[in-house]
Amino acid sequence: MTSPRWPVILFDLDGTLADSVNLIVTSYQHAFREVVGHEWDEAEIKSWIGKSLIDAFRGALGPELGEKAYASYTAFNEANTERLLKGYDGVPELLRDLTAAGVKTGVVTSKRRPPAEWAIRLCGLDVPLLVGHEDVPAHKPDPRPLLRGLELLGAKADEAVYVGDAAVDVVAARNAGLPAVSVTWGAGVRAEIEATNPVAVCDTVEQLRAVLLG
């Protein structure tokens, strides 16, 4: 095994380490049907993944209906997580190999801490949850979640990289002074990801492994 390219790697969770996109979209559509009587544009929903859930609902429906939709989403999501959440083949092995190579890893996500911890367990991911929704006052593309993750690992921006599946992840990394590596198996649109100029765009876990471990 060659030397890792970065000694510290922060990961997004949804659509990057955990195959939760279908669960998230289905939960959103349930909430919209229940609260406003119709589904929402799926492409727009996918564009919200990686950002704050409650902020997305408030932005779409306003404060009052947004709160109701958030509650509906949360109840449905919790009831259906074990049925709809899946893992990505090769990701648990990659995380274990990164640890074996001496890399410090961690998850920085806009997801609330309890469901994030649940997703990590269900997918068999050997990686600590560093930063969840409750841990910082602002969320991606704000840099504070990533900066908090670095702080908890005792790391500096110039020795770390952020791996995510959406353009907002790349922008957040840049705002925090980190390079970003993008994956295309999540919710992000490839053209939008490429427009943000990440260090690399990976279509498979093996490609990601080559970028991170050589």
Image: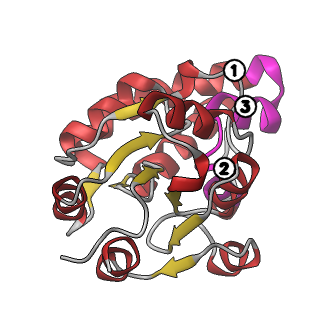
**Residue at 33% across / 68% down in the picture?**
4
**Residue at 28% across / 32% down in the picture?**
118
User: Is 48 one of the magenta-colored residues?
Assistant: yes
- Front one among 136 and 184: 136
Three-letter code for the amino acid on which mark 2 is drawn:
Trp
Q: Quadrant of residue 179?
A: bottom right
Separation (CA) of disc 2 from disc 1: 18 Å
Three-letter code for the amino acid on which mark 3 is drawn:
Asp
> At numbered mark 2, what does the secondary structure look like: helix, strand or loop?
helix
Number of numbered discs on residues: 3
Counting from the top left corner in percent of width and height, residue 1 is at: 18, 76
> At numbered mark 1, what does the secondary structure look like: helix, strand or loop?
loop
* Residue span colored magenta: 44-65
- SS assignment for the magenta stretch, majority: helix
Name the mark nearer the viewer: 1 or 3. Answer: 1
Separation (CA) of disc 3 from disc 2: 9 Å
Q: Which residue is mark 2?
A: 48
Three-letter code for the amino acid on which mark 1 is drawn:
Pro
Q: Are marks 2 and 1 in contact (CB under 8 Å)?
A: no
Which color scheme does this rendered protein use? secondary structure
Q: Is residue 51 left or right of residue 114?
A: right
Q: Which mark is residue 55?
A: 3
